[in-house]
């Protein structure tokens, strides 16, 4: 067997286990949905430790790429400053949620750069890196080649003035930046020249046979969604993937002739698992260069699947260096928020930095995210359901059993575990517990985290029923009562062990109440709390969440949504609304953002209205617009538009519209306001500093009548307000189909 064969063959006995959580990107604050895979990995790792497995868990931040450069520019920071800022925010959030990872770091570290370059060199030496020469625009003023999205000019097909280098937003045709008429560098506005440039590609077709051979041995340990998406990629056919970019922020390419390029972030980001481990473990090679004896288990959201099932394994296999390959993968679907999506910019949903302010313990959030874990389909965070699960399951079931047991021992047995003389019912309960513990162990082995938690809570339910049946508070049989409390104390001990991965603080509290030194998997199902053992005083584990608190939380995290929507339906366009007696607003009162239309359908109750789903990068929204007579659904799909995002939501023929797109009209022809911006970009006048950005992000809601008083126009294809041009970080706003007219 060759080294490569060995590296792609599954070995079923593993002495060591690596557990990774997908590295979150540091361009925003993580919300509860982002935290699902992080907490899942933490729960799984804690179980392994309880079972005395030799495990290393790894988490960190993904810090390279164009997103970091763009966000840094938006916030007036350098990429390094931006990453430092959000790294600190992420670290505090994971700490508060009690996520304990053995190795925690960053992809921008020196170690990760060294390992990334080493893997690249081995891939190159083994023939998996190919070089292609491309013609690309070069800015002589900025002294660099321009990626497509840093070039703009006139479309050669429809002659739209602000076409982007990769695609014209007006006619939708894909372009080569060199085809643009009068192209301009977006940063300095100078005319670039055409030069030849070289890029490096990962030859995925060449490595595909080895990749498929490896998959055959491990796919049984993958979640269904991981298998399905990977098979779709393979069916479509793997292609060579470019691994270099013309950027400044990233890991420099160690290849002669490519010194001015960096690696694509998707190349160095997964290698970051190895780099982060190398920073905290001197023996990291014993873990990452031992595919026969180390099992790699990876957790992530469904948007990260191909990077972990195809790309990262290809790098490791192609290096021919016995890298540890992924054995099992657990992919969660998405967690939504109250019939919508999480949105930091709109303050909708609970984000990591908000959770602490609620006064609700981290354990409660951890429990809810795991009992509601989106394992096979998307799930939803609902405040009503959150309250129900806290009050009925955490407080009413688990907390109730622990508190009643400890308080009864405190009051009636001087906190001393009494002698137990087991009868049939006692043996039956203990056997039921042992059976369920075995089932829980099997569920953890297959990473069924949600089902395992349900089984744990079922043990608590059995304990409550056993207590209720025994009625020690009125049963005259003292011997029986003593047995009941002795057995229950040990069941509570078992629950402390079992809930520790999910609710570590609660487990610690139970451990203190029972006055025991350790929580050990080997103690499960055994009467290890012996007669004569003295416990401590009872502590309240959890408290109920009242209706008023839920009402307040729902309003607090509903952002700019209004609970009481207008009873009358406003017009879809602002210009048809008469001005009110309120003072006219200015541009400083309006929040405009770039969005991509990702879904279009006819309104079921109005033939002249569309329902559009919009992607803002950090959230999705639904709007209703009256442009059926001017655009087909196919024409709209994929377009980037400008949306008023601090407009009060309105019900339009039974559908909530969460904003309004901008368009202009000239002689009966309606054209959308367009942009080169990235979904989520803010529109501004003059420069966008951090102070102005913070102002825009925190604008209050305005109503449609107030917005109608703002005068914006299209003039010579540009969008103006008070004779000042509107723009994003990527360039000026434009308009389709027409050149002049009011913007509405």
Image (cartoon, grey):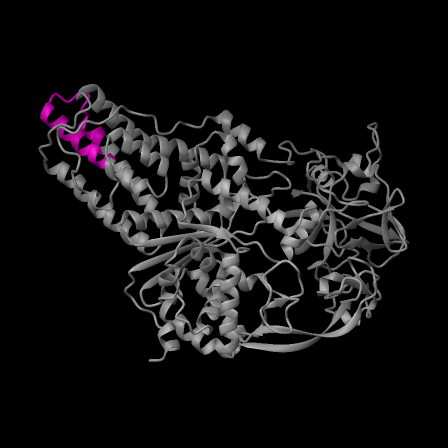
Location of residue 372 in the rendering, given as x and y in whole percent from the top left corner? 43, 44
Res 198 quadrant in image: bottom right
Q: In the image, what residue occupies the spot 49% across and 73% down?
A: 122
The residue lying toward the viewer, choosing from 634 and 521, is 521
The residue lying toward the viewer, choosing from 150 and 283, is 283
From the viewer's perspective, is residue 452 above or below residue 308? above
Q: Quadrant of the C terminus?
A: top right
Location of residue 86 in the rendering, given as x and y in whole percent from the top left corner? 57, 45
Q: Which residues are magenta?
A: 466-492
Whether residue 674 is visible: no
From the viewer's perspective, is residue 710 above or below residue 606? above
From the viewer's perspective, is residue 735 above or below residue 486? below
Q: How many numbered marks are there?
A: 0
Q: Quadrant of the N terminus?
A: bottom left
Whether residue 149 is visible: yes
Res 637 quadrant in image: bottom right
Location of residue 712 in the rendering, given as x and y in whole percent from the top left corner? 85, 44
From the viewer's perspective, is residue 33 above or below residue 250? above
Q: Is residue 469 magenta?
A: yes
Q: Is residue 256 magenta?
A: no
Magenta part, dominant SS: helix
Horizontal arrangement in the rendering, residue 201 relative to residue 458 (left or right): right
Location of residue 209 in the rendering, given as x and y in whole percent from the top left corner? 45, 78
Q: In the image, what residue occupies the spot 54% across and 74% down?
A: 238
Horizontal arrangement in the rendering, residue 402 relative to residue 216 (left or right): left
């Amino acid at each position: 067997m060759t080294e490569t064969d060995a590296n792609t063959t599954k070995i079923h006995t593993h002495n060591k286990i690596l557990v990774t959580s997908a590295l979150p990107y540091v361009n925003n604050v993580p919300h509860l949905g982002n935290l699902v895979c992080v907490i899942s990995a933490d729960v799984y790792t804690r179980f392994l430790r309880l079972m005395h497995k030799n495990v290393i868990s790894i988490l960190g931040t993904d810090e390279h790429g164009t997103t970091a450069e763009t966000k840094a520019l938006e916030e007036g920071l350098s990429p390094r400053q931006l990453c430092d800022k959000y790294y600190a925010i992420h670290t505090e959030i994971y700490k508060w949620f009690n996520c304990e990872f053995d190795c925690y770091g960053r992809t921008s570290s020196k170690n990760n750069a060294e390992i990334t370059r080493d893997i690249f060199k081995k891939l190159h030496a083994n023939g998996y890196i190919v070089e292609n020469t491309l013609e690309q625009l070069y800015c002589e003023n900025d002294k660099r080649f321009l990626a497509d999205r840093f070039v703009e000019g006139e479309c050669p097909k429809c002659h739209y003035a602000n076409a982007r280098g990769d695609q014209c937003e007006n006619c939708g045709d894909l372009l080569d930046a060199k085809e643009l008429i009068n192209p301009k560098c977006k940063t300095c506005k100078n005319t670039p020249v055409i030069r030849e440039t070289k890029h490096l590609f990962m030859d995925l077709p060449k490595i595909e046979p080895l990749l498929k051979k490896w998959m055959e041995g491990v796919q049984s340990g993958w979640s269904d969604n991981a298998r399905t998406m990977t098979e779709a990629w393979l069916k479509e056919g793997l292609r060579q993937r470019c691994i270099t970019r013309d950027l400044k922020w990233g890991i420099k390419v160690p290849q002669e002739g490519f010194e001015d390029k960096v690696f694509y972030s998707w190349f160095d980001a997964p290698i970051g698992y190895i780099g982060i481990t190398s920073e905290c473990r001197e023996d990291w090679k014993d873990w990452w260069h031992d595919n026969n004896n180390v099992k790699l288990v990876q957790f992530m959201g469904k948007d990260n699947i191909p990077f972990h099932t195809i790309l990262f394994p290809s790098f490791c296999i192609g290096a021919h260096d016995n890298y540890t390959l992924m054995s099992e993968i657990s992919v969660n679907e998405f967690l939504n928020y109250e019939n919508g999506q999480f949105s930091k910019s709109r303050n909708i949903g609970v984000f990591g930095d908000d959770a602490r302010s609620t006064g609700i313990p981290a354990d409660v959030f951890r429990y809810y995210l795991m009992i509601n874990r989106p394992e096979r389909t998307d799930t939803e965070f609902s405040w009503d359901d959150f309250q129900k699960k806290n009050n009925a399951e955490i407080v009413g079931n688990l907390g109730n059993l622990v508190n009643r047991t400890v308080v009864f021992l405190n009051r009636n047995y001087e906190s001393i575990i009494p002698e137990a003389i087991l009868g049939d019912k006692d043996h039956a309960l203990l056997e039921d517990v042992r059976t369920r513990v075995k089932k829980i162990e099997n569920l953890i082995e297959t990473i069924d985290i949600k089902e395992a938690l349900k089984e744990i809570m079922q043990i608590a339910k059995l304990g409550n029923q056993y207590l209720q049946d025994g009625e020690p508070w009125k049963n005259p049989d003292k011997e029986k009562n003593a047995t009941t409390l002795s057995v229950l104390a040990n069941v509570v001990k078992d629950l402390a062990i079992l809930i520790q991965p999910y609710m570590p603080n609660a487990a610690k509290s139970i451990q203190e109440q029972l006055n025991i030194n350790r929580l050990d998997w080997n103690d499960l199902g055994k009467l290890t709390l012996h007669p004569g053992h003295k416990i401590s005083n009872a502590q309240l584990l959890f408290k109920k969440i009242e209706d008023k608190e839920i009402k307040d939380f729902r309003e607090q995290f509903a952002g700019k949504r209004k609970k009481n929507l207008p009873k009358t339906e406003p017009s879809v366009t602002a210009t048809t609304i008469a001005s009110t007696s309120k003072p006219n607003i200015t541009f400083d009162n309006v929040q405009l953002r770039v969005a991509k239309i990702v879904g279009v359908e006819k309104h079921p109750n109005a033939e002249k209205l569309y329902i559009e789903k919009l992607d803002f990068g950090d959230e999705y929204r639904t709007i209703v617009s009256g442009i059926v007579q001017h655009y087909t659904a196919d024409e709209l799909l994929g377009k980037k538009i400008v949306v008023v995002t601090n407009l009060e939501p309105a019900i339009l023929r039974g559908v909530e519209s969460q904003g309004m797109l901008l368009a202009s009209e000239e002689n009966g022809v309606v054209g959308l306001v367009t942009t080169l911006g990235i979904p989520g970009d803010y529109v501004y006048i003059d420069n966008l500093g951090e102070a102005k950005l913070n102002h825009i992000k925190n604008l209050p809601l305005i109503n449609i009548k107030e917005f109608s008083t703002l005068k914006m126009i299209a003039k010579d294809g540009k969008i103006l307000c008070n004779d000042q041009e509107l723009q994003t970080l990527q360039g000026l706003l434009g308009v389709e189909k027409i050149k002049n007219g009011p913007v509405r």
